[in-house]
Image (spheres, rainbow, N blue to C red):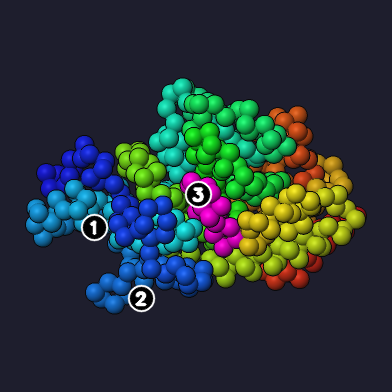
Amino acid sequence: MSDHTPPENTPPENNVPGAHAAEAAAPGVIARGTQGQGLATRSVHAGERRDPEGAIHTPLYAHSTFAFASTADLLDVVEGRKSGNLYTRYGLNPIIRSLEDKLADLEGGQQALAFSSGMAAEAAIFLACARTGEHIVCLGDVCGGTFELLGVNLPQLGITTTFLRADEVSRLGEVLTGRTRIVFFETPSNPTLDVFDIAAISAQARQAGTLTVVDNTFATPVNQNPLQHGADLVIHSATKYLGGHSDLTAGALIGGADLLAPVAMWRKNLGQVIAPQAADLLARSIRSLPVRVRAQNETAAALAAFLAAHPRVRRVHYPGLAPGEAKKIVEAQMRGAGGMLSAVLDATAEQTAAVVDRLRLFAIAPSLGGVESLITQPITTTHHGLDPGERARRGIADSMIRLSVGLEDADDLIADLAQALDAP
Ligand SMILES: *Cc1c(COP(=O)(O)O)cnc(C)c1O
């Protein structure tokens, strides 16, 4: 850093990356002007800035630093009197700020921070909110990286996590302590597509003085807005549906500016910000998010119905087919059931692998949320590291397959599943 860039020890309150989004906002709620318009409109227009050249969307500025007309102008940004561009690692770059405004708008949050990956976003929020001796509660199944971060990495710093399975959520009150800082969960979760009652859990956590952080990766803001139901923060692996084309890695956190200020400082000093090129690609993808996710909702529902009626399928996990209490939760907090489903086959692990291997349209790959349909057998990928007893307790059968439904024609995907399941 040269003498013309701000010192690293600038007080955080004067130099909060992302603070631009908070300026015009009423405390705790929505920041920008497109609210009241539909989600598709906002996906296209929210956060976009026309530049003097007339580019139709915010252009990509690949630059690491930005120049000022005068020292006074520079100090206005450094000391927080004006929003502006400054240094990309701080997130103060036009394409990153524009993307963050779009993300905040779509989740109905005051502010957003964009990260280099979903795990970067998770690490930043855990480190910003929990100190040595403090505690996190993690509900249900979560991404393998989250299990490792909470179960292996953070304990090295004296930050511990209690994991409750989906069938143990009624025990939440017993495990919340005066030192619990965060209740974290995915809904729907991976790979059993369990849904958790965001309003009820957030209310219980708030009473205990604890933040609720919801991973909304599977639902996307098209199908669910956790902040509307009482969550304090929303996290995304933008690598999945928000990116939507399996060609970028990114993450996001959305919520109140007061909660995100300390997180922004961790992001800045751990160097976790999204790259401008990834931010540009992500903003491009989000403009078509509602079109993609609504088509994926529809196709996944058709595939779930096909699988539920197939004699080789023992059980289908899909929020759109959820029974009883889960159905009520889906109706209360989701606008669409999503593009992810899993099924337990009436088969051995080997026979299940053979079904997977016979598929032609579905690619065998981890990850999800892209335009191409993917399939995994969770015991071989996402949940490979979990011991068999624990997998069984979590309902992750050896014969489970998980589908990420893409944008192909439903009939073609069903024909592919049929030939793979019906082969002798
Ligand atoms: C993939 C995933 C993550 C991790 O995100 P990365 O972008 O791979 O770091 C976190 N949560 C969920 C639900 C995921 O699917």
Up the image or down, 411 lies above or below 352; here it is below
User: Residue 50 at x, y = what percent?
Assistant: 31, 72
Which amino acid lies under the numbered mark 1 shown in the image of this protein? Gly
Horizontal side of residue 23 vs 382, given as left or right: left
Determine which of the numbered discs, if any, sits on residue 56 in the image: 2
Name the N-terminal-most of marks 1 and 2: 2
Q: Secondary structure at mark 3?
A: strand
| Residue beneath disc 1 | 84
In this view, the mark in front (3 or 1): 3
Name the N-terminal-most of marks 3 and 1: 1
Which amino acid lies under the numbered mark 3 shown in the image of this protein? Val
Q: Residue at x 44, y 31 (%)?
A: 130
| Front position in the image: 357 or 231 | 231
Badge 1 local density, few (<14 within 10 Å), some, or many (20+)?
many
Horizontal side of residue 227 vs 29, given as left or right: right
Horizontal side of residue 137 vs 10, given as left or right: right
Which amino acid lies under the numbered mark 2 shown in the image of this protein? Ile
Query: How far separated are the C-alphas under marks 3 and 2?
Result: 29 Å
| Residue beneath disc 3 | 234
Q: Secondary structure at mark 2?
A: loop
| Span colored in magenta | 220-240
Q: Residue at x 79, y 67 (%)?
A: 415
